[in-house]
Image (spheres, rainbow, N blue to C red):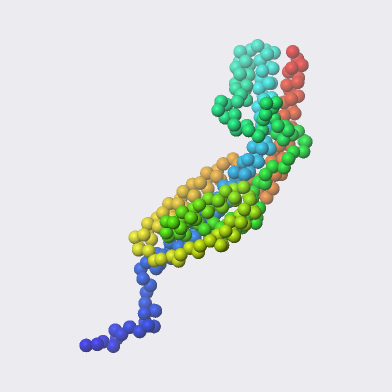
Amino acid sequence: MAYAGRVTTPEAEQSQAPRPEERLEQAVRAAEQALIEYEIAVETYRVEVENFSRLHEQRLGPLYSRIEELDALIAEAKAARTGDPEDIRRAEEARAQVLPIPGVEELLHGWMDGNGLFPEAAAMLTDQAVRPPERVRPSEEARKLYRDLARKAHPDLAQEEAERLRREEFITRVNAAYARGDEILLAELAAEWAAGPVPPERRPSPAEELYARLEWLTQRKEMLTLIACELEDGAIAGMLRLAPDDPDALLEEIATRLRADIEQRETLLAGLQGQG
């Protein structure tokens, strides 16, 4: 016997509740996109901090080194004048602070040669003009290109292993270009991606796989949060927060104070040496 009340029409089918996996798929897609945006933000910030750290060392490193050397010379001059064992101990400690650390001479590459500091580094100790350093942060156009490429080519959007590997290799090149602020190369990579194979459409996944995917995304987000916190808690990030729009001016202000400290120490040292 047929029951008219149970006849299902196309309209009735459309009004039925979605399949159980549909809302989970939507949640996973939303989590994937949110993670990508967060990764972009963390990577952008990491590059800013790393570049500012290099610039900080390039501009202020020689000044700090000069202050340490003057402190050692002052302590040695005092010890030579008094002969006091405590002064001698302090002089030895001060000198130990400026002695090169074995095994890290390569860290000085680009700053010193056999005759001492290179001209660019020596100029930092004075008011002489110096070759402009690398830019602190990538240009706005480089940032735009990077964000666009990261959104389109992120490995997390791949479902097949071969496609994931292709995206990982490509994103590695994108990250390297962005870290250098290479706007031209980023534009070339954007053109390369646009001409490449189109990723296949997402296929519905079993509920178990979706849950596992969502759990992985959560763990990844937690890891990135730790990285972001470490960056924000660093001294370099703290300096960046003081002058986000003009970090060059902040470094110049610090350099001015350091040069004044150097001048005071040089005056003190000259007085001690002249009292022989």
Q: Position of residue 172 (x, y in %)?
A: 53, 50
Is residue 66 shown left or right of residue 152? right
Q: Position of residue 236 (x, y in %)?
A: 60, 41
Q: Position of residue 159 (x, y in %)?
A: 43, 60
Return the residue found at the far top. Answer: 83
Q: Which picture quadrant has residue 27?
A: bottom left
The answer to whether 190 appears left or right of 4 in the picture is right
Q: Residue furthest left?
A: 1
Residue drawn 59% across and 29% down? 105
Q: Is residue 209 left or right of residue 233?
A: left
The quadrant in which the N terminus is found is: bottom left
- For the question of whether residue 52 can be seen, the reply is yes
Q: Residue at x 36, y 71 (%)?
A: 19
Q: Quadrant of the C terminus?
A: top right
Above or below, comparing residue 250 to residue 116 in the picture:
below
Taking the image as drawn, is residue 238 in sight?
A: no
Q: Nearer the viewer, residue 272 or 146?
A: 146
Total labels: the figure holds 0
Closest to the observer: 228 or 162? 162
Relative height, residue 200 to residue 120 (above, below) = below
Residue at 56%, 62% (x, y): give it: 195
- Establish if 127 lies above or below 151: above
Residue 83 appears at what percent x and percent y? 65, 11
